[in-house]
Image (cartoon, rainbow, N blue to C red):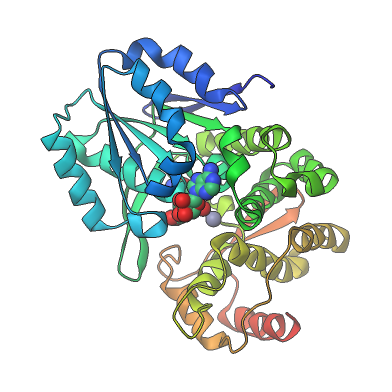
Amino acid sequence: MSEGGRLELRHPGGSTPIWVGAGALGNALEALGASLARRRVFAVTSPPVRALHGAALDAVAATAGAFRILEVADGESAKSVETVVTLWRRLLDEGGKRDSLIVAFGGGSIGDVAGFVAATFLRGVDYLQVPTTLLAQVDASIGGKTAINLPRAKNCVGAFHHPVATIAETTFLETLGPRQIRCGLFEVVKTAAMLDSDLFAMLETELEELLGGGAEVLAPVVEATAAAKIAVVERDPTEGNDRRLLNFGHTLGHALESAAVDVHGHKTLEHGEAVGYGMLFALELARPRGLGMKEAERIRELVVRIGLPPLPGGLDPADLIDRIARDKKAREGSIAWVMPMKIGDGLVVENVTGEEVSSTIDRFLAGA
Ligand SMILES: NC(=O)c1ccc[n+]([C@@H]2O[C@H](COP(=O)([O-])OP(=O)(O)OC[C@H]3O[C@@H](n4cnc5c(N)ncnc54)[C@H](O)[C@@H]3O)[C@@H](O)[C@H]2O)c1
Ligand SMILES: [Zn+2]
């Protein structure tokens, strides 16, 4: 097994080491061990993640002064006010103190809710991100954004609170299903298309192996994607500027994700898949603004090779536009569209008119 790599994210409050690779957990615990020994450690996880990888927490427990596991609901439903209140109460009841440490052990949902609890309990306690999905390893666990949802308002309440370390142990990824791998890879393509042309070329060459999901083959991609995100977060910690490039594909993506439901109200597009379509759509806006045909085609081809499910029939362009306008990323006045100008070089465009969006959506849905 290859040794895990170690990256570093410098932010206004200090710096966060990020261990990546097969063996990252062991390496990180070796480095962090002394700082855990006298502390109460609370691992937040969900039953399925615990069933799959809970044994890895034994090593954390062995290092900590005291150790508890706090289970929350699985998936997006963990990001609720109710979960936060339950966790605050459990922490208090179980002797949580200013120097306690929370470990977020799971996908991005667990990272977001456990991070938010860490940001707020006793005005802020330390936490570790231990992401177990590809999406969380390449994106959600890096950069200090934490959030929960209100009904119909995703990520509506949150805080910036950086973890004391992120541990992206890539062997956890071996139990992900193919759809989860694909969803993570769409976010990798997003980052590469905006920030890193070498990473983009690596994806083009190795996509088939990456879709297979092995820890060894994914590790360099996780590391390169994390490094690209780190660089942009260091330049723009609070997302006033360049960090918005990471929203490539997300403007239409969020609208599609919430609109695409079956007759039972179940989502038919995963987040990453909606972002895949959102990236294809942004290419249409980018072409008349200077994105070359060859580069647009390379991005389109990579997204298509990862594999998109068909769009559900009956999507209403006016409804999608309405959802875009309601998205919190729509600032007063104008909506920011993120698009590539070249591979590895993105741009935030604020002057796309409503008419242009509307006619492009019509064409896009007709051609999809
Ligand atoms: N804070 C940020 O900067 C940021 C960035 C991107 C996304 N996010 C958030 O991340 C969340 C999505 O994260 P996600 O895609 O990881 O989904 P998730 O956390 O909801 O997990 C999805 C599923 O994966 C399962 N799972 C977790 N690890 C597994 C493993 N190793 N093997 C098999 N199954 C496993 C979980 O049990 C769960 O059912 C969203 O809520 C999104 O808003 C946050
Ligand atoms: Zn995303």
Quarter of the figure that contains the N terminus = top right
* In this picture, residue 299 sits left or right of residue 119: right
Q: In x, y percent, where is residue 286?
A: 72, 65
Quarter of the figure that contains the C terminus = bottom right
Q: Depth check: 308 or 125 in front?
A: 308
Q: In x, y percent, where is residue 6?
A: 58, 21
Residue 321's place in the image compared with 177, above or below, is below
Residue 100's place in the image compared with 366, above or below, is above
**Taking the image as drawn, is residue 240 in sight?**
no
* In this picture, residue 262 sits left or right of residue 207: left
- Residue drawn at x 73%, y 63% is 307
Marker count (numbered): 0
* In this picture, residue 227 sits left or right of residue 61: right
Q: Residue furthest right?
A: 294
**Taking the image as drawn, is residue 213 in sight?**
yes
Residue 199's place in the image compared with 11, above or below, is below
Q: Depth check: 235 or 276 in front?
A: 276
Q: Quadrant of residue 66?
A: top left
Q: Quadrant of residue 152?
A: bottom left
Q: In x, y percent, where is residue 29?
A: 45, 18
- Residue drawn at x 71%, y 50% is 193
- Residue drawn at x 86%, y 64% is 293
- Residue drawn at x 67%, y 44% is 195
Residue 242's place in the image compared with 283, above or below, is above
* In this picture, residue 221 sits left or right of residue 8: right
